[in-house]
Amino acid sequence: MSNEGRQVVIPGQILGETPALRPGRGTFVENKKILAERLGVLNIQDNFVHIIPLRGRYDPMVGDFVIGVVEEASTSNWMVDINAPYPALLHVHEVPWEIEFADTEKYLNTGDTILAKVLSIDESKKLQITLNDRNLFKLKGGHLIEFEPSVYRRIMGKKYSMIEIIQKYTRCRIKVGKNGRIWIDGDAEGIEKVLSAISMIEREAITFGLTDRMEEFLKKDAKDVR
C-alpha cells in the first residue's frame, strides 16, 4: 500500500477539507475540515482520506487467503507486501501465466494488488505465496483499506453471512484477506457504506446480534435491492 513518506499523523490533526476530499477510516469532519481520529499513517486514495492504525502486523499461516501489494519485480519472481513482518515471495511457477525469462513486469509490477494464498513458511520465516488457484487473481482498480486482522471472522460472518449482507446493500465487489486488508470496487456512496460497516464491526466485534444490526444499519438509505 503506497504512502509517500509514510506520514504519521496524530489525533486532531487537520488532513484536508471537504468536498475536495472525502473522510475515510480513522477520520472525522468538523467545520468542513477532515481531522485525524487516531494515531496512524496517512493514506489518501481516490480522494478518500484514511488513517491506517499503528498496530501489530498480521501473523501468516499456510493456506490463508491474503491481499498483497507488489513491492518489486525481478527476473523470476516478485516480492509482495502482505502486511506481515517480512515480505512474501511469488515465484513465476506460482502464477497462471506462461512467463518468458525477465518478462515479469509485463504481468505484475510495483503497486499492483493481488488476491493470493500463503503457500509455505520455512524455519527462517521465509514466506511464499501462490496465485495457482481459480479463486486467486490480480485485482484491477478498486480501493484498498486495512482493518484489525483479529476481526476477520466477524467481517465474514457465519457461512459468509456478514460479508454477503454488506455486498448486497452497498452493491460493491468486496474481497477480504485474512491479513487485515479489504479490496472494494464500487461507487463512492457504496464505498463509504462499506467503510462505515467495517468500522462498526471493529467497534462491536464482541457483541451479540451484530449481523442483524448491520442489516438494519445498511437498510436505512440503501438503493433498491432485489
Image (cartoon, rainbow, N blue to C red):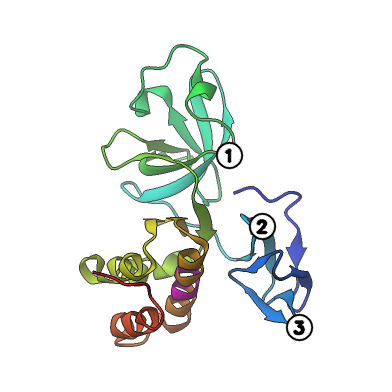
Task: Indicate whether residue 53 is drawn in magenta.
Answer: no
Compare residues 176 and 143 and report the one nearer the observer: 143
* Sequence-earlier tag: 1 or 2: 2
Q: Nearer the viewer, mark 3 or mark 1?
A: 3
Tell me which segment is drawn in magenta.
194-198
Give the labeled residue for mark 3.
31
Give the labeled residue for mark 1.
111
* Sequence-earlier tag: 3 or 1: 3
Q: Nearer the viewer, mark 1 or mark 2?
A: 2
Amino acid at pointer 1: Gly
Numbered disc 2: secondary structure: strand
Residue 53 in the image: above or below residue 114: below
| Residue 164 percent coordinates (x, y) | 28, 66
Compare residues 204 and 226 and report the one nearer the observer: 226
Dot 2 surroundings within 10 Å: few (below 14), some, or many (20 or more)? some
Task: Indicate whether residue 197 is drawn in magenta.
Answer: yes
Give the labeled residue for mark 2.
44
Q: Is residue 66 left or right of residue 33?
A: left
| Residue 198 percent coordinates (x, y) | 45, 71
